[in-house]
Image (cartoon, grey):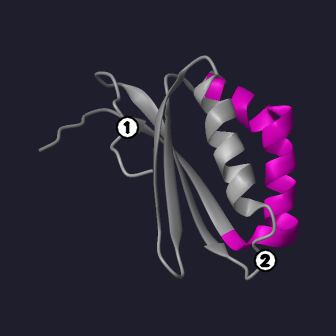
Amino acid sequence: MSNFAKTPEPPYYAVIFTSKRTDVDTGYGTMAQKMVEFASKEKGFLGIESARDAELGITVSYWDSLDVIQEWKEHAAHKIAQEKGKSEWYKNYSVRISKVEKDYSF
């Protein structure tokens, strides 16, 4: 993903997923792509931005409410991805949820 998400006027919410990967790559790319596809079809999804270097990955997804964030967390396919992440793909990760009160860009 190389483009900025096209978000609406605030307020909205950002889910910030920061991770360190293991050396296991089996199925990771395919699952990541599926998660973006599934999330983008969810009510309240606003967009996503992601960047990764050799050590650290950061993905920020944008949503219109806390309720839809919780629904996405409980989505059946997303729960499978979460478990695979814990058991195979991530050394560790952190999830932060923030309310975006103001934004601007250049």
Q: Main secondary structure of the magenta part?
A: helix
Q: Which mark is residue 5?
A: 1
| Mark 1 neighbour class, 10 Å CA radius: few under 14, some 14 to 19, many 20 or more | some
Q: Is residue 79 above or below residue 41?
A: below
Q: Is residue 87 above or below residue 8?
A: below
Q: Residue furthest left?
A: 106
Foreground residue among 69 and 37: 37
User: From the viewer's perspective, is 85 left or right of 55?
Assistant: right
Name which residue type carries label 1.
Ala
Residue 14 x %, y %: 47, 40
**What are the residue bounds of the magenta stretch?**
68-92
Residue behind mark 2:
24
Q: Residue at x 65, y 47 (%)?
A: 33
Name which residue type carries label 2.
Val
Q: Secondary structure at mark 2?
A: loop
User: From the viewer's perspective, is 103 left or right of 63?
Assistant: left
User: In which image quadrant can residue 6 be found?
Assistant: top left
Q: Residue at x 69, y 42 (%)?
A: 35
What is the spatial separation of the Cα atoms under label 2 and label 1, in whole angstroms? 29 Å
